[in-house]
Image: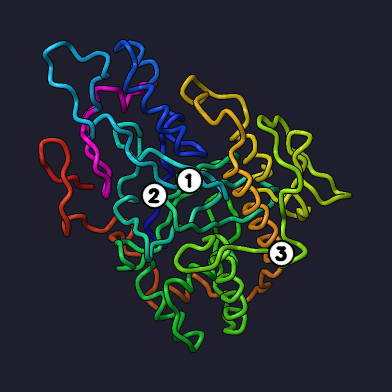
């Protein structure tokens, strides 16, 4: 997958969060600030973004090119801002780091480096993204994850990895694969190889390294087939019902439930091994929870503990402090699904194919698959549809 994009750099943490209502409240707090100075402080300006910065809308989003004046700062006789310009853009679902689904205000005026090339290829029917996980020596966890959401590429520990779309254009057009790779593999393994198969194989076999995820290719067609079956199960699990799949579920008897309600303001999360239960805030209880889900790590950080900390830890600023005053029921549902995903993923992790006989760089070079053309390491042209920036010019890469 030669075309890759670095992680997003938001520049301000208040534009992303675990619930959309808080994002709207934060937006309103900025827009309705009583003085320009107060508004600037809340906005948290950086070198790339200030409240006065003019910037093109993100592909697929309809936002103005500059932020509106605060309503309380409009002088008598001035034309008030249009209602659309002061309303918070509808938050979109994103993948924040590994396994954690958040919401993001999709407004280019608020994001330092939004990676518009990723937004340009985002669609709801075909596109998938792989995200390399930050490399931490000696840590466990997957080297590569996949999502149907736009990923921000955040890594809770270690150096963030790259984001690699499966397709270079929306609608499942132009796979982001080395030219000739699927044809070569199809001939080698005696069966058709689709772009989704390459993605599935990568999920099943990727190994971490300081240079990014390493994906070996086997000589044996049976090894390929075994890894492919496991990879497609991992893919379906990670997509959580997207693209027409089913939501992940543990078998009856192992399915987690909320046995005791989570308190309004839980301050801790722990695991009771004897009862196979998550204890939340001292009195909340979810069970049964596989121990493998509780200990599941990426980059040396436990996923469940990190998920809880993001929602209940100390706020980083005044806008980040605008969040639910009590534990929402939706978070309990999300936690149940996360426990399910981690438990099932841990089971599948034990089925990784083991092999040592791999295709070499020399063989791929001899088949014309390598070297990778420089052109496919860059985004596809954006001149096949209309996008405008400030003043009406095209937004080009």
Gap in Å between the C-alphas at discs 1 and 3? Answer: 25 Å
Magenta segment, principal secondary structure? Answer: loop
Q: Secondary structure at mark 2?
A: loop
How far, Cα to Cα, is label 1 from label 2? 9 Å
Question: Residue 139: x and y, percent?
Answer: 69, 48
Query: Residue 348 sits in which quadrant?
Result: bottom right
Which label was assigned to residue 381? Answer: none
**Which label sits in the foreground, 1 or 3?**
3
Residue at 77% across, 39% down = 270
Q: Is residue 225 above or below residue 348?
A: below
Compare residues 67 and 206 and report the one nearer the observer: 67
The residue identified by callout 1 is 153
At 44% from the left and 44% from the top, the residue drawn is 7
Residue wearing tag 3: 347
Q: Tag 3 or tag 2, which sits nearer the N-term?
A: 2
Q: Nearer the viewer, mark 1 or mark 2?
A: 1
Task: Please determine whether, in this image, residue 62 is positioned above or below residue 383.
Answer: above
Which image quadrant is residue 282 in? Answer: top right
Q: Residues within 10 Å of mark 1 (few under 14, many from 20)?
A: many
Give the left or right position of residue 234, taking residue 129 as reference.
right
**Residue neighbourhood size for the residue with mark 2, other residues' Cα within 10 Å, grouped as few (<14), some (14–19), many (≥20):** some
Marks 2 and 3, how far apart at CA: 31 Å
Residue at the right extreme, as displayed: 274
Of label 1 and label 2, which has the lower sequence position? 2
Residue depicted at 23% across the width and 25% down the height: 68
Are circles 1 and 2 on residues that touch, CB within 8 Å? Answer: yes
**Residue 275 location (% of width, % of height):** 86, 50
The image quadrant that residue 237 belongs to is bottom right
**Residue identifier under label 2:** 5
Please name whichever residue, 360 or 258, is drawn nearer the observer in this view of the structure: 258
Residue 59 magenta-highlighted: yes
Question: Magenta span covers which residues?
Answer: 43-66
């Amino acid at each position: 997958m030669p075309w890759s994009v670095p992680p997003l750099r938001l520049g301000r943490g208040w534009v992303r969060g675990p619930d959309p209502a808080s994002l709207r409240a934060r937006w309103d707090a900025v827009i309705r600030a009583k003085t320009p100075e107060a508004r600037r402080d809340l906005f948290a300006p950086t070198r790339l973004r200030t409240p006065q910065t003019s910037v093109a809308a993100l592909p697929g989003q309809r936002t103005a090119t500059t932020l509106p004046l605060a309503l309380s700062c409009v002088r008598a006789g001035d034309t008030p801002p249009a209602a659309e310009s002061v309303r918070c853009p509808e938050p979109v679902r994103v993948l924040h780091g590994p396994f954690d689904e958040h919401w993001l205000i999709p407004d280019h005026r608020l994001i330092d480096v939004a990676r518009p090339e990723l937004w340009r290829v985002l669609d709801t029917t075909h596109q998938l993204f792989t995200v390399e996980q930050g490399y931490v020596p000696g840590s466990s966890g997957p080297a590569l994850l996949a999502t149907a959401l736009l990923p921000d590429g955040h890594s809770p520990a270690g150096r963030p990895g790259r984001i690699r779309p499966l397709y270079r254009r929306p609608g499942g057009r132009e796979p982001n694969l080395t030219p000739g790779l699927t044809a070569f593999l199809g001939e080698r393994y005696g069966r058709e190889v689709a772009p989704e198969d390459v993605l599935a194989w990568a999920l099943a076999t990727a190994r971490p390294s300081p240079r990014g995820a390493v994906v070996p290719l086997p000589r044996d067609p049976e090894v390929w087939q075994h890894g492919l079956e496991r990879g497609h199960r991992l893919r379906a699990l990670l997509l959580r019902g997207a693209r027409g799949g089913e939501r992940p579920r543990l078998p009856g008897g192992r399915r987690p439930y909320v046995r005791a309600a989570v308190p309004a303001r839980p301050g801790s999360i722990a695991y009771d091994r004897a009862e196979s239960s998550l204890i939340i805030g001292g009195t909340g209880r979810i069970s049964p929870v596989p121990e493998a889900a509780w200990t599941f790590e990426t980059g040396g950080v436990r996923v469940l503990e990190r998920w809880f900390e993001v929602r209940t830890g100390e706020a980083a600023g005044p806008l980040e402090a605008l969040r639910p005053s009590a534990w929402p029921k939706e978070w309990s549902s999300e936690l149940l699904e996360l426990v399910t995903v981690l438990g099932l993923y841990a089971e599948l992790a034990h089925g990784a194919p083991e092999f040592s006989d791999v295709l070499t760089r020399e063989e791929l070079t001899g088949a014309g698959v390598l070297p990778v053309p420089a052109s496919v390491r860059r985004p596809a042209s954006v001149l096949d549809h209309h996008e405008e920036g400030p003043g009406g010019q095209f937004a080009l890469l």
